[in-house]
Amino acid sequence: MAQSKINAYVNPFPSLTWNFLDINRARMDAEVSFCNVPGTATIPDGVCTKDIPFGELDGTYKNIQTGMGTEFDSAFDSGMNAAGSLVKVFSVSGKVPSSVRLSFDLASLNNAACDVVIDAAEQSDCTFIFDCRNSADECETTGTFGLRVRVCAAQNSLINIVFVNMVSKKDTCFFSLGSVVADSSKVEFTELELGGKRVYSGNLQNLLGYQSSFEGRCGYITRPQSSLDMNYISRQTGRSTSSRMFADGVVTGDGRKVWRGTIDFVRGCIESRGDEQENVLLLSPEAVNKTLPVILCDEEAVEGRHGASIGKLAPEILFYMQSRGIDEKTARRLMVRAKISAVCRFICDSALVNDINNFVEGVFDE
């Protein structure tokens, strides 16, 4: 399969700040093979799938922007079109009792990038779980995996998306999500970024409909000699919309992490609400963290809240634990587990949660 390159500035911040802070955007240079979504998906009743050539994809789907930015979308579109790859389109109708599950293994996908569309009909309800990992020996392979997901949520629908990154510490991983949300519809997003050397994640929610809403939660571990760059945007256009975004994670060693969170109140979105929060635990004096929670407001009759908490393990907490026979290394494990477990509560797949716990234990053993 032919290799293509994505060389683009990604995760652009909607309202630029000082360049010397190096937080306005990130640079991604990745070599990938644009390919069809593997046929290992678990598809329950109530969900239909189609593989559509990118050039024949409906313009409604093509026009959905995703969180990693227009430059990324343009490069991704060009690669999909040149490769003649198929877009996996999931059509959801009614309340689907079980999850759609897609698992990707870098050991067999060979630097893959895939494109997914979720079309949720009125009154539909479904959960989609995407996880990526690398079962190969870390000493033998270094890979790249990328996934773009676009969601069209019709009136009164509910779409829950879960993405779990458990690739090896040498891999590159990127995930870009974009949604258009209609009246009284809701998109939920649960994200765990646990692996990878260079990781990029973008999430853009367009809340167009009356009383449309979004709720996102993210947990992460940034390991030594790795970087994680995230961009969350909630663009609230409809009246009485609601968005909540929460991120919670740890940065270890000389790891580098950037989290951008933007709530954009567009003129006319009266009686809308937004809340964005991040809590970061730094487990090393060499760790680099950049957090930028911002509210853009072009409407008066709205309610917005944002904030960030950045700190290290307090000496008094360590003393308390050590006085009860818990050493510092074990105390750090407990804190990390607590952050990841808080996000795992929203993942309705016990087997996947067990895999996550095993992966986190492996991170501690490095």
Image (tube, rainbow, N blue to C red):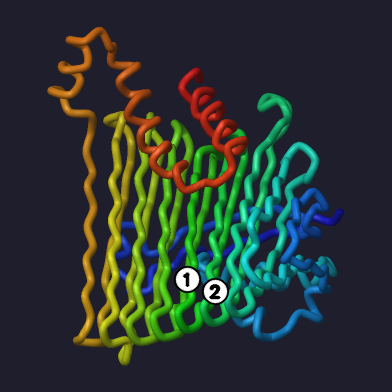
In the rendered view, tell whether residue 216 sits above or below residue 359: below
> What residue is pinned by disc 1?
186
Percent position of residue 356, x then y: 54, 34
- Residue closest to the eye, 74 or 89: 89
Residue at 57% across, 80% down = 154
Indicate which disc, 2 or 1, sits on the residue closer to the N terminus.
Answer: 2
Residue positioned 80% across, 52% down in the render: 38
Answer yes or no: do the residues labelled 2 and 1 have beta carbons within 8 Å?
yes
Tell me where residue 353 appears, x and y as whole percent. Answer: 55, 36
* Left or right: 133, with 202 as reference point: right
Front residue of 21/213: it is: 213
Q: Which mark is residue 89?
A: none
What x and y, as percent, mark residue 65? 55, 76
Hey, what amino acid is under mark 2? Ser
The residue type indicated by label 1 comes to Lys
The image shows residue 135 at horizontal and vertical percentages of 71, 31
Image side of residue 71 versus residue 206, left or right: right
Residue at the far left in the pictured view? 316
Tell me the CA gap for discs 2 and 1. 6 Å
Which residue is under mark 2? Answer: 157
Q: Give the image quarter of residue 108.
A: top right
Left or right of 70? Residue 276 is left
Q: Secondary structure at mark 1?
A: strand
Relative to 146, say whether 15 is above or below: below
Residue placed at 46% from the left, 22% from the top?
Answer: 364
